[in-house]
Amino acid sequence: MEVLSSRVLIRPADPERARRFYRDVLGLAVYREFGPPDDPGLVFFLGSGFLEVSGRGPGPVGEGAPMLWIQVRDVRAEHERLAAAGVRVTREPRVEPWGLVEMWIEDPEGVRIVLVQVPDDHPLRRDQRG
């Protein structure tokens, strides 16, 4: 299979609330808007991928729902910003045994989001060519 593009799809019960969360609270940049002007679907830039928030789902997601993994430059700064904005933080920032700094939050529908920072001294930052 040759993958040319991909995106994660979210079908929230409350699309307007979800659009506001990803656009205004998290601050993701909009890649594309489509559909009716009063209830548009939005596709956001998500690093090297995309996140599409469109349509309507049946209600809050369950425990087995997919999670989003988003790498950021400074998890602790995002923690301060998002907590001040009223985002539900389910796990405070901490260094994991594998060396990454992680914090867990939820969107208004209960989608779990892991914010990750790769410290400067982490092996992922080393040049593996040598």
Image (cartoon, rainbow, N blue to C red):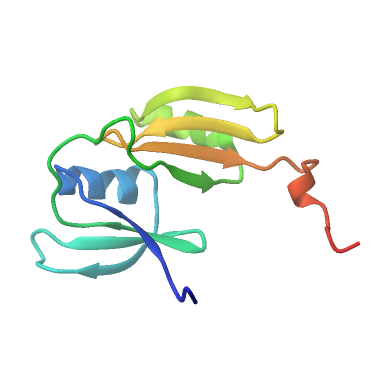
Instruction: Identify whether 70 is placed above or below 114.
Output: below
Q: Is residue 76 visible to the viewer in this orientation of the structure?
A: no
**Residue 70 percent coordinates (x, y):** 50, 46
For residue 119, what is the image quadrant? top right
Residue furthest toward the front? Answer: 1
Give the total number of marks visible in the rendering: 0
Horizontal side of 73 relative to 23 (left or right) equals right
For residue 122, what is the image quadrant? top right
Horizontal side of 17 relative to 105 (left or right) equals left
Instruction: Identify whether 114 is placed above or below 96.
Output: below
Q: Name the residue nearer the viewer: 55 or 74.
A: 55
**Residue 12 percent coordinates (x, y):** 19, 45
Horizontal side of 1 relative to 34 (left or right) equals right
Q: Is residue 110 visible to the viewer in this orientation of the structure?
A: yes
Instruction: Identify whether 5 is placed above or below 99.
Output: below
- Which residue is at 24% across, 50% downward? 19
- Which residue is at 21% across, 50% downward? 11
- Which residue is at 15% across, 56% downward? 55
Horizontal side of 77 relative to 81 (left or right) equals right
Quarter that holds the C terminus: bottom right
**Residue 113 percent coordinates (x, y):** 42, 38
Residue furthest toward the right? Answer: 130
**Residue 75 percent coordinates (x, y):** 57, 36
Q: Name the residue nearer the viewer: 27 or 123.
A: 123
